[in-house]
């Protein structure tokens, strides 16, 4: 019974393409979850996190799928997007301009979505800068530096890498949830 339902997915070409696209993007995400931020000694960082077992760091790392403890390009995850969405939702209540946009229908919603994307990149950049400063100050329990060459070049590279990772995850989420018009029509 269940196998018949799964098999029927592949009989509808558009649905089959969406399922295969989603699986492909999940594979890309998993690969990106193993690419570290340039300049980070992942061994020293891993040693630091082993000593942090049972702390707030371990809990935060759990929410990022271990991307934080490995300092991968997806270390920020989708949280800047969620935060930006919440901020924009709250601002639509207090800002007459945004409230007017919200009431304009689809065009206004597209504009708010665009503002949310900009906010996401801004938040990811701020968080990326904070993470770069934190990584530069971090040493492993053995005294090994997590960042061998600290400085503005490392910070800039970290900000760009983490913001780009967040933007990519944001794009993935939008692509996966975008339902083509073909699937809205009744059979």
Image (tube, rainbow, N blue to C red):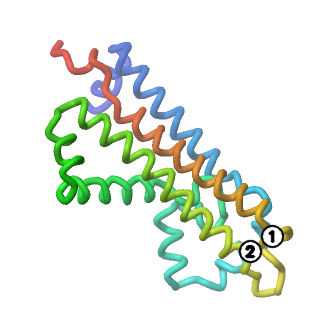
**Residues at marks 1 and 2, CA–CA distance in whole angstroms:** 6 Å
Mark 2 — residue?
A: 136
Q: Percent x, y for residue 158?
A: 69, 58
Name the residue rendered at 66%, 64% in the picture.
Answer: 70
Q: Percent x, y for residue 139?
A: 76, 82
Position of 96 relative to 61 (above/below): above
Position of 164 relative to 8 (above/below): below
Determine the secondary structure under disc 2. Answer: helix
Position of 55 relative to 10 (above/below): below
Mark sitting earlier along the chain (1/2): 2
Nearest to the observer: residue 67 or residue 104? 104
Query: Quick one: label 1, few (<14), some, or many (20+) residues within 10 Å?
Result: some
Whether pointer 1 and pointer 2 mark residues with C-beta atoms closer than 8 Å, the reply is yes
- State which quarter of the image contains the N terminus: top left
Mark 1 — residue?
A: 150
Q: Which quadrant of the structure image shows residue 125? A: bottom right
Determine the secondary structure under disc 1. Answer: loop
Q: Is residue 36 left or right of residue 106?
A: right
Name the residue rendered at 24%, 59% in the picture.
Answer: 90
Q: Which quadrant of the structure image shows residue 51? A: bottom right
Q: Which quadrant of the structure image shows residue 137? A: bottom right
């Amino acid at each position: 019974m269940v196998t018949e339902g799964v098999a029927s997915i592949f009989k509808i070409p558009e649905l089959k393409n969406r399922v295969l696209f989603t699986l492909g993007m999940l594979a890309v995400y998993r690969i990106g979850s193993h690419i570290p931020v340039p300049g980070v000694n992942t061994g020293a960082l891993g040693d630091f996190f082993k000593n942090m077992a049972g702390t707030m760091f371990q809990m935060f790392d759990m929410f990022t799928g271990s991307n934080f403890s490995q300092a991968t390009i997806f270390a920020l995850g989708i949280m800047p997007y969620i935060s930006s969405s919440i901020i924009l939702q709250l601002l639509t209540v207090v800002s007459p301009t945004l409230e007017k946009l919200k009431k304009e229908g689809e065009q206004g919603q597209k504009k708010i979505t665009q503002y949310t994307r900009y906010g996401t990149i801004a938040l990811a950049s701020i968080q990326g800068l904070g993470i770069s400063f934190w990584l530069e100050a971090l040493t492993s329990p053995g005294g090994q530096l997590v960042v061998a060459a600290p400085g503005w070049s490392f910070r800039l590279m970290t900000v760009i890498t983490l913001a780009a990772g967040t933007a990519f995850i944001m794009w993935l989420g939008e692509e996966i949830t975008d339902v083509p018009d073909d699937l809205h029509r009744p059979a």
